[in-house]
């Protein structure tokens, strides 16, 4: 298996400058759509009912990267450093754009989901580059058993470069979306659901384009990536749920925290990977791109599956 993953590292996905531009615009549009649903009250909810929100933040921004670091380190003899770095990059990203929808289907606490989305969207501007730099460099130093010195030095992460990219494709659309929502509430209310649905379709189309342009490569190597992403995502969902239960939260809130922890913005991970200012394009980072691209597909499948499973549960007992 390790030999096959080493082959993946050397692969460059077919994704030209036009594709990078479309990717960045897609992520920016998605974040604009998310911001149209954010209001100051969403942030105030974090302070009015702090316990569920704080547990969600703990799970998503501390425990998720820590879990990923431990998992990647435990798999050190079976995966390449870039596969591990891809896992850490995804874990450092804020919640995905469908987490609120999945929480609704799962009969979770949608208000909590929106509050956590609000925090992760803004907090992720700083926490994503910090977590990726901190846990990524820690993994390369202590967990990547098959790493060579040259690769480790090349993959060392500069949080400032990551922050600059995130501000451009997340921060600016986020500010614009919140501004439009505050200044033009009636217009926002009339278009927000259409924009949200369209943004999800555009993201799915983007993933389909990436897969379609590299179909032969994915067909050849997906069997190696599939199990890694499945285990990683399953552990994230499980950890999120039982973290909530451990802190005494009701089942409804625990479901939401699980979804917010397990649904990650893998599109942002791809945008960072295809940015030559963050990752020089001569680096062997094919494994990172494969992990991020397949995560974008799998978390939709797993999210809808677990929502369908949970929606059939009786919520008579909420403690």
Image: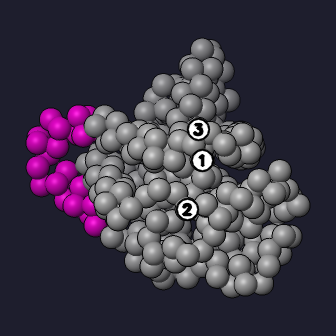
Q: Give the CA separation, mark 1 to mark 3.
A: 17 Å
Q: Residue at x 24, y 40 (%)?
A: 195
Query: Horizontally, is 310 left or right of 19 in the view?
Result: right
> Looking at the image, is 30 positioned above or below residue 208?
below
| 164 to the left or right of 319 | left
How many other residues sit within 10 Å of disc 2, few (<14), some (14-19) or many (≥20)? some
Mark 1 = which residue? 217
Q: Where in the figure is residue 7, as x and y percent of width and height?
A: 71, 59
In the image, residue 273 lies in the stretch drawn in magenta:
no
Which of labels 3 and 2 is toward the front?
Answer: 2
Name which of mark 3 and mark 2 comes first in the sequence: 2
The residues bearing labels 3 and 2 have C-alpha atoms spaced at a distance of 21 Å
Q: How many marks?
A: 3
In this rendering, the label closer to the viewer, 1 or 3: 1
Give the percent coordinates (x, y) of residue 17. Answer: 35, 65
Residue 295 in sight: no
Rendered location of residue 112, percent (x, y): 48, 42
Residue for point 33% across, 41% down: 202
The numbered mark, 1 or 3, whose residue comes first in the sequence reads 1
Give the residues in magenta.
170-196
The numbered dot on residue 298 is 3
């Amino acid at each position: 298996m390790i030999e096959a993953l080493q082959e993946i590292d050397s692969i460059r996905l077919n994704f030209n400058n036009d594709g990078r531009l479309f990717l960045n615009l897609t992520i920016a549009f998605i974040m604009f759509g998310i911001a149209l649903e954010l209001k100051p009250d969403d942030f105030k909810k974090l302070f009015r009912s702090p316990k569920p929100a704080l547990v969600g933040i703990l799970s998503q921004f501390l425990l998720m990267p820590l879990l990923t670091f431990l998992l990647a380190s435990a798999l050190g003899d079976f995966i390449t450093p870039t596969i591990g770095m891809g896992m850490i990059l995804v874990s450092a990203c804020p919640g995905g754009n469908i987490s609120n929808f999945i929480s609704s289907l799962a009969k979770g606490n949608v208000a909590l989901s929106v509050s956590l989305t609000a925090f992760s969207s803004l907090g992720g501007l700083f926490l994503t580059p910090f977590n990726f730099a901190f846990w990524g460099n820690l993994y390369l130093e202590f967990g990547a058993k098959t790493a060579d010195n040259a690769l480790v030095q090349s993959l060392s992460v500069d949080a400032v470069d990551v922050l600059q990219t995130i501000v451009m494709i997340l921060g600016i659309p986020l500010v614009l979306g919140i501004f439009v929502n505050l200044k033009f509430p009636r217009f926002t209310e009339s278009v927000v659901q259409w924009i949200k649905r369209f943004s999800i379709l555009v993201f799915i189309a983007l993933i389909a384009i990436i897969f379609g342009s590299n179909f032969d490569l994915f067909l050849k190597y997906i069997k190696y990536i599939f199990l890694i992403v499945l285990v990683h995502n399953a552990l994230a969902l499980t950890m999120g749920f039982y973290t909530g239960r451990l802190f005494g939260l009701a089942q409804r809130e625990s479901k939401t925290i699980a979804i917010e922890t397990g649904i990650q913005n893998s599109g942002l991970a791809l945008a960072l990977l295809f940015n030559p200012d963050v990752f020089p394009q001569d680096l062997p980072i094919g494994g990172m791109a494969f992990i991020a691209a397949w995560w974008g597909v799998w978390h939709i499948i797993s999210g809808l599956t677990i929502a369908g499973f949970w929606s059939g549960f009786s919520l008579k007992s909420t403690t």
